[in-house]
Image: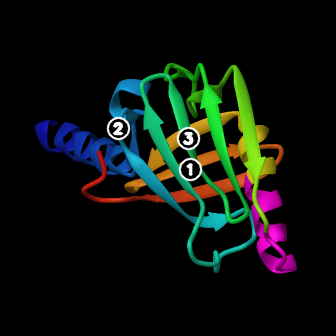
Amino acid sequence: MARVWASVALGLAVSLVGCQATDLHALDGTQWRAVRVDDIVAVPAPPPMLTFRGRDASGSGLCSTFTITTITIDAAAAPPRFGFGSLSTTTSGCFNEELQRVDRAFLDALSRAQTIELVGGRLVIDGPGGTIVFDRVQGAS
């Protein structure tokens, strides 16, 4: 009987390794690089970036910069619910149509995001506007 319970416990531990709790405290001071924007897997360089600071975040798209204020994360929901007070953007000169398309997709997905979670070390933000997958930038504070 002990062997059965050990197998069940091991199975649960293995299944939970991929997903980690997501909360503002854990994200504070971290920086993330977009590696996928919805169906766009080859994100042009320099990629969109996202940096968390307390209850706010900021970053850059390919043709824009943005600020997010008053972030909320409901970590009790599965997956964790993501919300914010406002998203302000500033566009810069970007004359390449492909870069503009990726930038629009990134900002649309970000502005309509509803969930946020860490999956296998990657940050995944998802909602009706699409999915953004980020890799953490090591050494950023």
Q: Which badge, 1 or 2, comes first in the chain's sequence?
A: 2
Neighbourhood count class around disc 1 (C-alpha, 10 Å): few under 14, some 14–19, many 20 upward: some
- Please name the residue shown 56% across and 73% down the image: 46
Residue 118 is left or right of residue 17, and the answer is right
Q: Which badge, 2 or 3, comes first in the chain's sequence?
A: 2
| Amino acid on which disc 3 is placed | Ser
- Circle 2 residue: 29
What is the x, y in percent for residue 62? 68, 65
| Amino acid on which disc 2 is placed | Gly
Gap between marks 1 and 2 measured at Cα: 17 Å
Question: Is label 2 in contact with label 3 (beta carbons under 8 Å)?
Answer: no
- 1 vs 2, front mark: 2
Residue 83 occupies which quadrant of the picture? Answer: top right
Q: Which residue range is magenta in the image?
A: 94-106
Q: Is residue 75 above or below residue 13?
A: above
Q: Which badge, 1 or 3, comes first in the chain's sequence?
A: 3
| Amino acid on which disc 1 is placed | Val
- Please name the residue shown 81% across and 49% down the image: 108
Quadrant housing the C terminus: top left
What is the x, y in percent for residue 47? 58, 68
* Disc number placed over residue 58 in the picture, else none: 3
Gap between marks 2 and 3 measured at Cα: 11 Å
Q: Is residue 81 above or below residue 140?
A: above
Secondary structure found at label 2: loop
What is the x, y in percent for residue 61? 66, 58
Quadrant housing the N terminus: top left
- Count of numbered badges drawn on the protein: 3
- 1 vs 3, front mark: 3
Residue 92 is left or right of residue 117, and the answer is right
Residue 127 occupies which quadrant of the picture? Answer: top right
